[in-house]
Amino acid sequence: MITRRVKWASVVAAISLLGFSGAAWAQEGGAAKNSGGEVSAAATSPVHYYPRQQVDASFEKAGGGDLLYNGDGGAQNFTFMTSSRIVPGGGELHMKSTDVIYVVKGSATVITGGKLSDVTGNAINPSTGKPFPKDEIRGRSVVGGEPHHLAVGDVIVIPNGVPHWFSEVEGQFCYHLVKIRQP
């Protein structure tokens, strides 16, 4: 099927795709060559650092996690967040975003593929109280599809356009989530 358990090295490869945005930044004037022909960062660095204490605390935020990096307000094509859940969620289908998930605590079953059931118009994001974007479709669950049991250290990449649903959660399930937005 489309997704399988992937080893950590595959995450590095997937996340390295994010480096393209940094390369584009450098080409657009974010970096300059010095007299030796070496490339150096501009005066303002695009680096964002989140200490472990902040990351750990973000899993405990109300609503089940926190948006750590917002893509510089939409200037970048990706965001980084922590997510925590203790119960299954609803089905999701992101038309323009690929989800890269790295599990850090607990275990859960995610169903990928199949069909989104009982689609909800104007679904509300419980974390923000605002409607989800129109290209992020929500439903009750996913019918059909392939189950993937996720545990600590596992990675799953769910491409845009693939329905997915956390159908079972065992204990507190915490994961890092990189959302890569397609143009």
Image: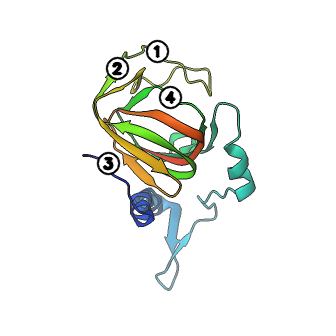
Assign a secondary structure to mark 2.
strand
Q: Nearer the viewer, mark 1 or mark 4?
A: 4
- In the image, what residue type sits under mark 2? Ser
Assign a secondary structure to mark 4.
loop
- Estimate how packed mark 2 is, as few (under 14), some (14 to 19) or many (20 or more) residues with alpha carbons within 10 Å: some
Disc 3 designates what residue? 3
Residue 154 seen in this snapshot: yes
Whichever of labels 4 and 3 marks the residue nearer the N terminus, that label is 3
Cα–Cα span, label 1 and label 2? 15 Å
Residue shown at the point (41%, 62%) measured from the top left: 7
Position in image of residue 115 (x %, y %): 29, 26
Disc 2 designates what residue? 117
Q: Are marks 1 and 4 in contact (CB under 8 Å)?
A: no
Residue 182 seen in this snapshot: no
Relative to residue 93, is residue 7 depicted above or below?
below
Q: Nearer the viewer, residue 40 or 119?
A: 119
- In the image, what residue type sits under mark 4? Gly
Q: Are marks 2 and 4 in contact (CB under 8 Å)?
A: no
Relative to residue 2, is residue 169 depicted above or below?
above
Q: Nearer the viewer, residue 158 or 174?
A: 174
Give the number of the disc on residue 5.
none
Give the number of the disc on residue 122.
1
* Residue extending farthest left: 1
Residue 74 relative to residue 128: left or right: left
Assign a secondary structure to mark 1.
loop
- Estimate how packed mark 3 is, as few (under 14), some (14 to 19) or many (20 or more) residues with alpha carbons within 10 Å: some
Q: Nearer the viewer, residue 100 or 70?
A: 100
Disc 4 designates what residue? 89
Whichever of labels 3 and 1 marks the residue nearer the N terminus, that label is 3
Q: Nearer the viewer, residue 158 or 103?
A: 103
